[in-house]
Amino acid sequence: MAKTFQQLMDEARKEIREVTVQDAKELLENNGKFVLLDVREKDEYREGHLERAVSLPRGFLEIKVETTVPEKSTPIIAYCAGGVRSLLAAKALREMGYRDVVSMSGGYTAWKAAGYKWVQDYQFTPDQLIRYSRHFLLPEVGEEGQAKLLRAKVLMVGAGGLGSPSAYYLAAAGVGTLGIVDNDVVDLSNLQRQILHSNDRVGMPKTESAKMTLQALNPDVKIIPYQEKLTSQNIMEIIKDYDIIVDGCDNFPTRYLVNDACVLAKKPNVHGSIFQFEGQASVFYPGKGPCYRCLYPEPPPPEMAPSCQEAGVLGVLPGLIGVIQALETIKLILGKGDTLVGRLLCFNTLTMEISTLKLKADRACPMCGDKPTIHQLIDYEEFCNLRASHAA
Ligand SMILES: [Zn+2]
């Protein structure tokens, strides 16, 4: 015989212990092992929830709970809006073998009425819920990770070969604030690789062109252009507002400048460099791994360090390396995966050999070693020309 709703509820009440919001609060405060399951719908959860709550809507409970709570002996407190759905959910969990499940009577409504703490996650717009839906499906990103991306501030050094693909993907991913430093204008010879720009923008400042392209891709992203050359005088002021610096520069003075400034400001520096058919990438994270000077204390002599303009570059190569920089940046923001901190990724596009070399912080490094000798920014143009002038 079919059961009425009332009969189902009565049965559930016989099997499942209900706790008051006061009891639930005490249980959570005194026992860190409790998993707090919010079985309401996603949109209810988004509007506000208990602090430690894991969202697992009633409709997905049986399908997903074994991933969320693998151990059947884990104590669980289930709650919903008013205590009905969570009671039925608790009964279902009991039937699946979860031994220690209670339901919070009165639910979220009673919790809020008692004046207890609740939190609200990032409030996504309907468009954002669609735009980032493929990120939400990844447990490593989810709504929490997407909120981190939207709140993140990343500075791109250069809107050229590396900065183009890097900024493109960071904007697509919804990194909320992108600063772009570049004092150059778009040149026809850039378009073979600098995909942020286009034919009709030749002569336009790269920062302006970059802003147009990125804003068209994703209006969520705030683009802050710096139409100036990065120098010892302005870099500290510019980088202070950013969480992560992506170095996409094409010259040694800027590379050392960015390295030193990042060490001084203790900011992660996502490094990329290219030469003809070979590229490299790493993450120099002060306090967590080596810096660029640990690898290369001194710049090569200028005649050994030709630019793309002099040595040529395969257009796809900065695309590959720039995308790796974007990827590393996103991993740093999310706090997921193993980043390239302490490793140098080397990509040879002719042989398709990709290797990662282990890097060690050099205790004798003048910048980040035990007894650093550099305590402020220097004149990098002079530093990088030093050997040439000695040789002359
Ligand atoms: Zn170092």
Image: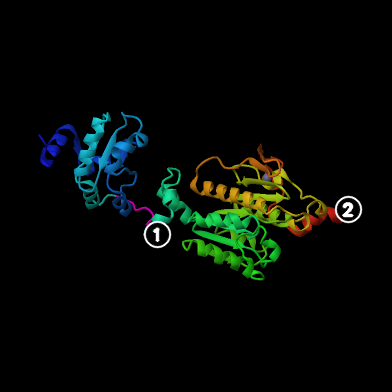
- Tell me the kind of residue under disc 1: Asp
Q: Earlier in the sequence, mark 2 or mark 1?
A: 1
Provide the secondary structure element on which disc 1 rests. helix
Q: Which residues are magenta?
A: 117-125
Q: Nearer the viewer, residue 322 or 188?
A: 188
Residue ID for mark 2: 391
Quadrant hosting ligand 1: top right
Q: Residues within 10 Å of mark 2 (few under 14, many from 20)?
A: few
Q: Indicate the secondary structure of the residue bearing disc 2.
A: helix
Judge whether residue 222 can be spotted in this image: no
Q: Position of residue 284 (x, y in %)?
A: 63, 46
Q: Amino acid at mark 2?
A: Ala
* Residue 51 in the image, given as x and y percentages of width and height: 34, 47
Against 387, residue 219 (above or below) is below
Q: Is residue 121 left or right of residue 266?
A: left
Residue at image coords 69%, 65%:
188
Q: Is residue 371 left or right of residue 223?
A: right
In three-dimensional space, the C-alpha distance between marks 2 and 1, rounded to whole angstroms, equals 60 Å
Q: Quadrant of residue 72?
A: top left
Tell me if mark 1 has few (under 14), some (14-19) or many (20+) residues whose alpha carbon lies within 10 angstroms of its own.
Answer: few
Q: Position of residue 93 (x, y in %)?
A: 26, 34
Q: Which one is nearer the viewer's eye here, 230 or 183?
A: 183
Q: Quadrant of residue 247?
A: bottom right
Determine the main secondary structure of the stretch shown in magenta.
loop
Towards the viewer: 277 or 255:
277
Q: Which residue is mark 1?
A: 127
Q: Is residue 331 magenta?
A: no
